[in-house]
Amino acid sequence: MGYDVGDKPLNVSPLSNIDEGKTVKIVKIVGGRGLIKRLYEIGLLPGAEIQVLRNSKHGPVIIRNNVSGTFSLGFGVAKKIMVEVM
C-alpha cells in the first residue's frame, strides 16, 4: 500500500499487519474523535515510534512506546493505526 506525503513515498500499512520485533512510526490514525483522543492520551500520535512486541495477526497487538510503556491494543484498533516501518 503506498501513500505520498510531498515528494517522499511512504510504505504505509496498518499496525495489525506488522511483524513482531519491528519498530514503526505512526503516520495516521483512521478513527473517530474518541479513539484518537484515547490514543493521544497514552502517547500514540503521528510521529511516535513504537515497537511491536507481539502480533498473532488475529488477536491483540502488544506494543512498547518509550514515552508511556507497554500496551495491548485490540486487533480492530490496531487496524486503524497506519504506520511506516523504520
Image: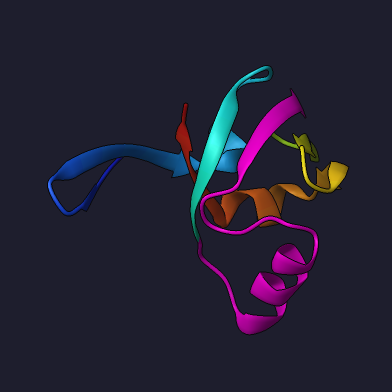
Which percent across, then down, holds residue 14? 51, 44
Which percent across, then down, holds residue 46? 52, 57
Which percent across, then down, holds residue 21? 67, 17
Q: Quadrant of the N terminus?
A: top left
Q: Left or right: where does residue 23 sit relative to residue 83?
A: right
User: Which residue is at the front of the view, 52 or 66?
Assistant: 66
Q: Residue at x 68, y 29 (%)?
A: 51
Q: Left or right: where does residue 37 sit relative to residue 23?
A: right
Which percent across, then down, holds residue 64? 78, 35
Whether 35 is drawn above or below 18: the answer is below
Residue at the far front in the pictured view: 67
Residue at the far bottom in the pictured view: 33
Q: Left or right: where does residue 55 sit relative to residue 22?
A: right
Q: Is residue 63 magenta?
A: no
Residue segment shown in magenta: 29-57
Whether 33 is drawn above or below 53: the answer is below
